Image (cartoon, coloured by chain):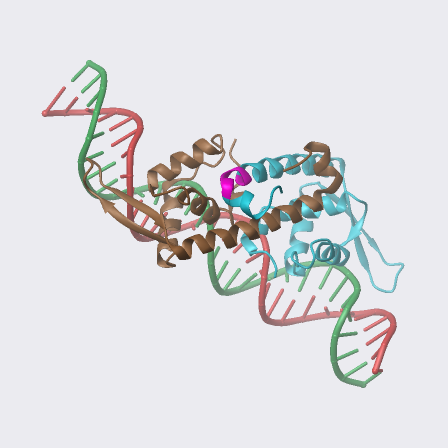
Chain colours: A brown, B cyan, C green, D red
Amino acid sequence: MGFSRDLLRGSLDLVVLAELSCGERYGYQILSALRARSGGRIDLKAGTLYPILHKLERDGCVRSRWDESAGRDRKWYGLTEKGRGRLAENTREWLDYARCVRGMLGGEGAAVEGAV
Amino acid sequence: MGFSRDLLRGSLDLVVLAELSCGERYGYQILSALRARSGGRIDLKAGTLYPILHKLERDGCVRSRWDESAGRDRKWYGLTEKGRGRLAENTREWLDYARCVRGMLGGEGAAVEGAV
DNA sequence: CTCGATATATCGCTGCCCTAAGTATAGCTC
DNA sequence: GAGCTATACTTAGGGCAGCGATATATCGAG
């Protein structure tokens, strides 16, 4: 099933930023994309995603615009320059962290899977 | 410096269990070992570690014994069978999670580092 | 003999994520 | 056209985990 809540914690901003790095997305689309790309294991609720987007916007990492041309109103989000910087920085930190924990697992991890 | 608090969250039980898989350890020793093996980036506070050990013990994953032979009292912790099972299970889940997030990062991650 | 390192324990604060509830439109079925 | 489901966004409230602070005690160095 889904990953334990605490595993995702701390990676959520990162995966959202990563998703936006491919181009503009609206909220509901992000939820579906993450679910699809993770094989259903990252299944964020709306109440989790939107506050993250709002916080990223407050921080100047994303920019949003309403699109009312379609039947349903949609709010599109896109990365700012600052957001790209944040993504690069968070990515570096995450890879660092993953390599570190992977090292801790040592033989245990290797026994399960050769490489991450 | 250290990893963001939330990144570690959800991996703490795992790294503690992994550390114990090498043999018996006492609390202060675990703190030092994790700090050393992570290059100082996993720098748990005592107030973080001991509650984790107590919880693992309540869950039957670790067993503890006091050693008063040395000047300073030490409480040694060791994995139980159940603990080994938990370690294997958590390791599998973590590797799964890492592979998943790594996939999300796509080109971004690859640009920074070839593999985790 | 004072200071810092060793060694364990507990409590309260903070902050993140989730649950839940709320609003609203589009499109389908009957 | 009534009702259901999927789409689409928002906010308020609560739980829980780790951190900082605090307490206690021994040991070695200066």
Q: Is residue D28 left or right of residue B20?
A: right
Question: In the rendered view of the protein, which quadrant contains the C terminus of chain A?
Answer: top right
Question: Seen from this angle, which residue lies furthest front?
Answer: B111
Q: Is residue A29 magenta?
A: no
Q: Is residue D27 left or right of residue B96?
A: right
Instruction: State whether residue A64 is above or below residue B69.
Output: above
Rendered residue at 81%/58% (across/down)? B74
**Residue B55 in view, yes or no:** no
Residue B57 % position (x, y): 70, 45
**Residue stretch in magenta:** B101-107
Q: Main secondary structure of the magenta part?
A: helix
Question: Seen from this angle, which residue lies furthest right?
Answer: B69
Q: Is residue B106 magenta?
A: yes
Seen from the viewer's position, the closer of residues D28 and A72 is: A72
Residue B100 % position (x, y): 54, 36
Residue B13 % position (x, y): 65, 46
Residue B104 % position (x, y): 49, 39
**Residue B14 in view, yes or no:** yes
